[in-house]
């Protein structure tokens, strides 16, 4: 929006100008000028933004330990709780995971919007990231304590699977919201979402961890193998929680994006005060 500067206008909208102007409609005091928007921010410029790189790294570790748990679940799930497994019968494991995922999805829909409104997006993401190492450490311990009763051990492990899927799904939603916050305009949102999908490819390393588990199970005792797998999951989760501490909710000018790649506009409120955004 520009006042009394018709000579610099590139595309005038007289209908809007006459509507907004209190003067004569034939000679409005307000001139509407449509400026050409700048090009979307390139991938190279996004790769130079520290806040986005930290967020993508945290998301990569989240995807890695979440996918690793899912890949190792057939091995850890059917292992005896006395050996550090979860004690869930193999015939019931698939149906159990299906039902648990459904309830976890309902829980995410119900709780994430309220939790974000109450605690804030960044604080909630950091808190959820801190929970994952505890899940991977407490789950085998609780299963071993309940090893005297197979049904009790199976119920405890099922609850642990539900908690893991609920928190991992909720964390993915929070990361998506944080990623969208890093885009200064809607034109660059597609680029950032594409970079998020590329970072998600690190979960393919979960297959390597699964292959290593089968190799170790043939060379070492099953209890030692399960302990090593739980420790690996806890390590991935702790590293992701450490990176989440450095994640920021929004990018900053100059530190993340140079001012020349941004589009600055002036907005006027009803009182006539001007704000640059």
Image: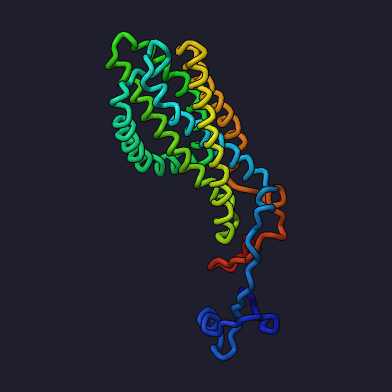
Question: x%, y% of residue 189?
Answer: 55, 56
Residue 33 falls in image quadrant: bottom right
Q: Left of 89 or right of it: where is 275?
A: right
Q: Residue furthest top?
A: 148
* Identity of the residue drawn at 52% across and 17% down: 216
On screen, residue 216 above or below 208: above
On screen, residue 206 above or below 268: above
Q: Nearer the viewer, residue 208 or 67?
A: 208
The number of callouts visible is: 0
For the N terminus, which image quadrant? bottom right
Residue 55 falls in image quadrant: top right
Q: Left of 146 or right of it: where is 267?
A: right
On screen, residue 174 above or below 61: below
* Identity of the residue drawn at 29% across and 25% down: 91
Question: x%, y% of residue 84?
Answer: 43, 14
For the C terminus, which image quadrant? bottom right
Residue 135 falls in image quadrant: top left
Q: Left of 156 or right of it: where is 241?
A: right
* Identity of the residue drawn at 51% across and 25% down: 233
Q: Nearer the viewer, residue 254 or 235?
A: 235
* Identity of the residue drawn at 57% across and 34% down: 244
Q: Nearer the viewer, residue 239 or 131?
A: 239
Question: x%, y% of residue 196?
Answer: 55, 46
Colour mode? Answer: rainbow
On screen, residue 250 above or below 239: below
Q: Nearer the viewer, residue 161 or 222?
A: 222
Question: x%, y% of residue 240?
Answer: 56, 31
């Amino acid at each position: 929006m520009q006042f009394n500067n018709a000579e610099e206008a590139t595309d005038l909208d007289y209908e809007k100008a006459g509507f907004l102007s209190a003067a004569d409609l034939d000679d409005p005091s307000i001139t509407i000028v449509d400026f050409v928007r700048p090009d979307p921010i390139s991938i190279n410029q996004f790769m130079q933004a520290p806040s986005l790189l930290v967020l993508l790294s945290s998301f990569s570790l989240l995807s890695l330990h979440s996918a690793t748990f899912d890949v190792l679940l057939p091995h850890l799930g059917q292992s005896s709780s006395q050996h550090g497994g979860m004690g869930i019968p193999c015939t019931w494991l698939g149906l159990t995971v299906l039902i648990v995922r459904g309830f976890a999805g309902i829980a995410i829909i119900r709780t994430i919007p309220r939790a974000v409104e109450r605690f804030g997006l960044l604080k909630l993401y950091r808190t959820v990231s801190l929970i994952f190492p505890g899940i991977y450490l407490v789950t085998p311990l609780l299963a071993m304590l309940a090893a005297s009763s197979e049904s009790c051990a199976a119920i405890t492990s099922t609850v642990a699977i539900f908690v893991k899927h609920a928190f991992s799904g909720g964390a993915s939603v929070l990361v998506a919201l944080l990623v969208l916050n890093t885009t200064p305009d809607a034109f660059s949102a597609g680029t950032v979402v594409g970079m998020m999908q590329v970072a998600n490819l690190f979960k393919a390393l979960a297959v390597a961890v699964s292959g290593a588990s089968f190799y170790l199970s043939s060379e070492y005792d099953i209890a030692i193998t399960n302990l090593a797998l739980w420790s690996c999951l806890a390590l991935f989760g702790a590293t992701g929680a450490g990176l989440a501490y450095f994640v920021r909710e929004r990018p900053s000018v100059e530190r993340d994006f140079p001012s020349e790649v941004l589009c600055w506009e002036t907005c006027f409120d009803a009182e006539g005060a001007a704000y640059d955004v």
